[in-house]
Amino acid sequence: ELIVYDNTFVLDIVQDKNVICENEKVSFTNNTISSDPLDYTWSVSSMDGVTISDVKSTAPEITFTKYGDYVVTVVMDGKCSDQTATYNVRVKKDPEVKFGTLETICNNNKFTFDNTKVVYTWYNMLETEKEIEWTITPNTGVTEEDTDKEYPSYTFTETGDYTITVKVKAM
């Protein structure tokens, strides 16, 4: 018996997410149409911190445990034709913030945070993905002078001890 396959196929693999956080999965849905039986081989640009549920699957789940930018590649080998497709995945890591030494100031003086008083580690985040929220407790006797979210300035009009917190997160 002679079997004749169509030498082309319509590649249709959809990735569910292209931006995730560490320890999350990306899933693929395969809607490829082919009369030609296809063999699939999946790989990732760096396998460090990456687990593929089944490299020969038509639609695997891939888990990423380390932040970074990855390229997922699938090679489809058929009897009559081959195709390769790539998918980008950005894995984010939670940002970090650390305070340096904060000096004592006199009331009615402006205090400005700078890169020696607060240090951010953003990892692989774009500028538009950063969110910063400052809280000063108690908030009475405090006036925000500069609304720069990374390095704001405040004037403390009342004497006392203040707790300063900054929350950073990826959007």
Image (cartoon, rainbow, N blue to C red):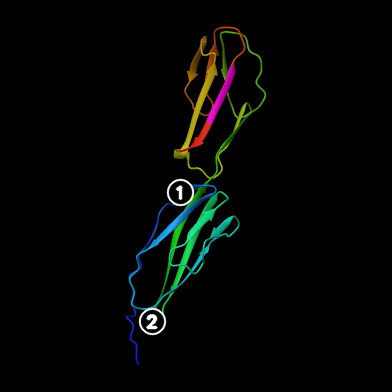
Q: Residue at x 62, y 26 (%)?
A: 117
Residue 19 place in picture, x, y as percent: 45, 49
Residue 12 horizontal side relative to residue 127, left or right: left
- Count of all numbered marks drawn on residues in the image: 2
- Magenta stretch bounds: 163-167
Pick the front one: 170 or 107: 170
For residue 166: magenta? yes
State the quadrant of the N terminus.
Answer: bottom left
Residue 90 place in picture, x, y as percent: 49, 50
Q: Amino acid at mark 2?
A: Cys
Residue 1 vs 152, above or below: the answer is below
Residue 130 vs 92, above or below: the answer is above
For mark 2, what is the residue?
Answer: 80
State the quadrant of the C terminus.
Answer: top left
Task: Give SS at disc 2.
Answer: loop
Pick the front one: 6 or 68: 6
For mark 1, what is the residue?
Answer: 19
Pick the front one: 129 or 153: 129
Task: Give SS at disc 1.
Answer: strand
Q: Residues within 10 Å of mark 1 (few under 14, many from 20)?
A: few
Q: Main secondary structure of the magenta part?
A: strand
Looking at marks 1 and 2 on the same chain, the residue that comes earlier in the sequence is marked by 1
Q: Residue at x 66, y 18 (%)?
A: 103
